[in-house]
Amino acid sequence: MYPKDLNYRMPAEWTKHQRTFISWPIQESMCYPEDYGNVCRGYGELVKAIAEFEPVTVIVNPKELQKVRTICDGKNIEFLEIEHNDAWIRDNGPTFVVDDEGNIAAVNWMFNSWGGKYAPWDLDDQVAPKILEYYGIPYFNAPLVMEGGSIHVDGEGTLITTEECLLNPNRNPELNREQIENYLKQYLNVEKIIWLKRGLFGDETDGHVDNIACFAAPGKILMQVCEDPEDENYEITRENLEVLQNATDARGRKFEVIPIKQPPKRICENKRLTLSYINFYFVNGGIILPQFGGKAEETDKLAEEVLQKTFPERRIRKVDGMAIIKEGGNVHCTTQQMIAGKK
């Protein structure tokens, strides 16, 4: 029995949330463990920003509970002790689904640390079921390695992803494109999948879509664009724009693409950082938007203006996007929404 058989579907991220989950970072798993203090500061800022809009549940290793409380305790913030290896709950957390009566369930995907990149990940693979068991949410175990950052849905039957990630042999080498599509349709109750080509250059997640494009509404997509032909992201952007210009959604609509100019390239130890304004996060009544400062001040402002124009009813809450980016992700990567339903 699949979620689709019971009329469960994955709603769009802007649907009202019951709460947001965030996993606290683990120093031993960090690429730059010497930055642990700054990363914790960034997480604390993010938790408090989200708590201005909705409840936040911080997943924390039991031995670190008291320390984390001193950093981000406050109104609308609670802590759930679950042992974990790493901090990116967008990718190892549950995907919540809801039926027409408002009953909530979830999908528990298999997790292998982005194609086996960072061992160990055994605790991370158990975080989703432990969250769901704590809240008494029924769930479906999907036989598919899948990360939440690799998909976006419009809530009306359309899903976008990238070939670079979902077809990567380090995830599900035994499955072909058609089989992966079928699993997504059965577990998320979507009808049509739009396959973009690649994600941002150098993205160690193998091209997660949540760094390059997301739905703003059914039939409307926000995309980070590059205007410099000498930049590695220029060709990537052009490829993906071409895909969207020739595609329609599950309801037969042509896509309106809203461009957001990418921030200037930033290098750390000979590696390009994956800076993305698309890695923002919807909260109830607002948007949490990463800002990068320095040479990105102009594009920071432009991104805020585009989002405010696109979502005039939402408050744009800016946070420091540089605090955790060296670890490979940003606001959207660190969060996972629990849909508001009857339960």
Image: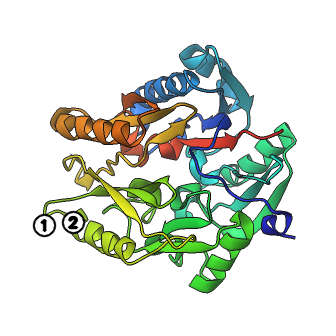
Residue type at mark 2: give it. Answer: Tyr
Q: Position of residue 289 (x, y in %)?
A: 40, 36
Q: Residue at x 84, y 45 (%)?
A: 137
Q: Position of residue 170 (x, y in %)?
A: 54, 74
Above or below for 214 versus 206: above
Residue corresponding to mark 1? 229
Residue 65: image quadrant is top right
Q: Mark 2: few, some, or many residues within 10 Å (few <14, many ≥20)?
A: some
Q: Residue at x 59, y 81 (%)?
A: 173
Could you say which is closer to the camera, residue 159 or residue 90?
Answer: 159
Q: Earlier in the sequence, mark 2 or mark 1?
A: 1
Q: Are marks 2 and 1 in contact (CB under 8 Å)?
A: yes
Could you say which is closer to the camera, residue 234 or residue 155?
Answer: 155
Q: In 3D space, how far apart are the residues under numbered discs 2 and 1 (Cα atoms)?
A: 5 Å
Residue 156: image quadrant is bottom right
Q: Is residue 134 left or right of residue 40?
A: right
The reply to whether residue 218 is in sight is yes
Q: Position of residue 162 (x, y in %)?
A: 46, 70
Provide the secondary structure element on which disc 1 rests.
loop
Above or below for 82 versus 79: below
